[in-house]
Amino acid sequence: MNHSSVAVVIPAYNEEQTVAEVVRVALQLTPVVIVASDGSSDGTARVARDAGALVIELPQNAGKGPALYAGLQAAEEGERTEQVVMLDADLLGLRLEHLHILLRPVLSGELDMTIGIFEGGGLMTDLGNKLTPHLSGQRACRLDWLLGVPGLGQERWPEPAITDALRRGHLRWEYVELPMLAQVMKEEKRGFWKGVSYRSKMYVDLLGYGRRKKRSQKDRIEKDQGR
């Protein structure tokens, strides 16, 4: 079934090896598939466009949050877009079934958001996903709600901001299993030591979300008091 009210948004940074297949599967769900290339220096934008996606190209690498936000803004321009499915660009084994698992509870009104967890796709990706399920990039929800998440477009990694907004807004959400799905490990994509360095920087940034949020709130209060 073709869901014309649904957009699939795929932030991508140097993912020319895998993004085309993710786009191909997403197009089986909806014609609105958007890849936000986050300052990629390889052929990510070209292969995604050739695969049939609408491609938004950020001029420099700003992070997954700004790329996701740019993709969501492009999706908002479609008058009929109501729901959004978010996917990582480095998935392996993606099938239409996985998109339906994410989307069905949101379309039915049962849940406000689903968060996908790998199951059986590979030892390391399964383990990493289950240790930090709140960091999963595979999600579905209403587009208008997601665009309203505070700080979404400023956070290099948007998942903590999204999860924080879910909890504070008392929304209904659940983890859903995505069978036989995996993703390319950073150590495989960038080489072992570069991958370890990249992963370490990612976790440092993720752990700093609470501190940045408090500082932002403090700055806002001081600004209001100075008026």
Image: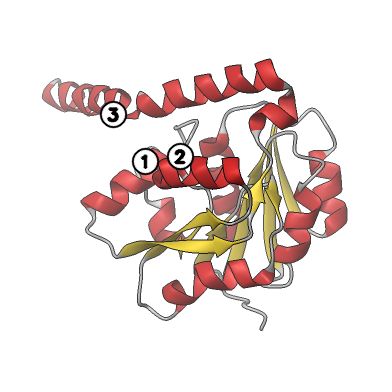
Give the number of marks.
3
Distance from the alpha carbon under mark 2 to that under mark 1: 5 Å
Residue 210: assigned label: 3
- Neighbours of disc 1 within 10 Å: few (<14), some (14-19), many (20+): many
Say left or right for 23 vs 49.
left
Around disc 2, counting alpha carbons within 10 Å, would you say few (fewer than 14), some (14 to 19), or many (20 or more)? many
In the foreground, 10 or 21: 21
Q: Image check: 5 left or right of 173?
A: right
How far from the left and from the top, in percent, is residue 46?
A: 86, 44
Q: Position of residue 25 (x, y in %)?
A: 74, 65
Q: Residue at x 81, y 40 (%)?
A: 16
The numbered dot on residue 161 is 1
Q: Amino acid at mark 1?
A: Ala
Q: Which mark is drawn over residue 158?
A: 2
Q: Secondary structure at mark 1?
A: helix
Q: Is residue 216 above or below residue 100?
A: above
Q: Which mark is residue 66?
A: none
